[in-house]
Amino acid sequence: MKKQGITSLGEVIVDFIATDSSNTAFQRLLGGATVNVAVGVSRHGIASYYLCKLGRDETSTFVEGKLKKEDVDLSFCSYHPDKRICSVYIHLNQHGERYFHAYVNETPDKWITSEELDKKPFVNSKIFYFGSGTLFHPIARKTTEQALQYAKEENMLMAFDTNIRLKRWEARISAEKRFYLL
């Protein structure tokens, strides 16, 4: 069987984009680099697996619905009833230009774990894609290391999106050290 498709590991983000400069009404959209890649690949008719942890709340249901509508395979995600999806609030200034106002992560310790990670999507895919967001937290970092091991065992191409957000790291030196070790 010829391997095709991509397996993406990441954290789903819901973008709340202000509809005007009053910044009181927002349009809700899926966001995050790994989600964008998973959806983009699927739109080209290529198999796309997305690995993350989802909750059971309305926002997780929104995410699931949108990703399933895009034919992104969520079969290998894990669930936790307390998981809350990360949110980014994007405001508009008086000139209509966007700026990041707030990043909200109510459950930073709720990640798909290395024990929950299934090898099947790695067996079925040609490319493994992940971003720097999986390196911020020890649980996510351990899961990423396991995913990289699976990808190596399956001779997958690996793509890493640095997408550095220094405000999310405890220290710049920590970010530099993590990227150096990859």
Image (spheres, grey):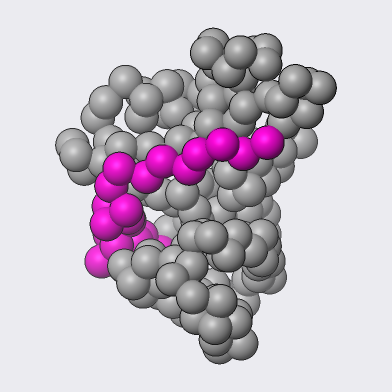
In the rendered image of this protein, does residue 148 appear above or below residue 10?
below
Which image quadrant for residue 146? bottom left
Image coordinates of residue 140 in percent, x first then y, are: 38, 65
The image quadrant that residue 145 belongs to is bottom left
Taking the spot 50% from the left edge, 39% from the top edge, the residue there is 102
Q: In this view, does 138 lie to the left or right of 30?
A: left
Query: 5 or 93: which is nearer to us?
Result: 93
Farthest right residue in view: 95
Q: Is residue 27 above or below residue 120?
A: above
Q: Give the range drawn in magenta.
A: 99-119
| 111 is within the stretch colored magenta | yes
Residue at x 54% of width, y 20% of height: 28
Front residue of 61/49: it is 61
Instruction: Tell me residue 162's x, y (percent).
Output: 66, 66
Asked whether, in this view, residue 33 is left or right of residue 97, the answer is left
Residue 48 percent location from the top left of the image = 59, 44
Of the 4 image quadrants, the one containing the C terminus is: bottom right
State the residue at coordinates (31%, 67%): 139
**On-image quarter of the N terminus:** bottom right
Determine the residue positioned at 62% across, 27% down: 91
Is residue 56 in view?
yes
> Can residue 144 be spotted in the picture?
no
In the figure, is residue 107 to the left or right of 124?
A: left
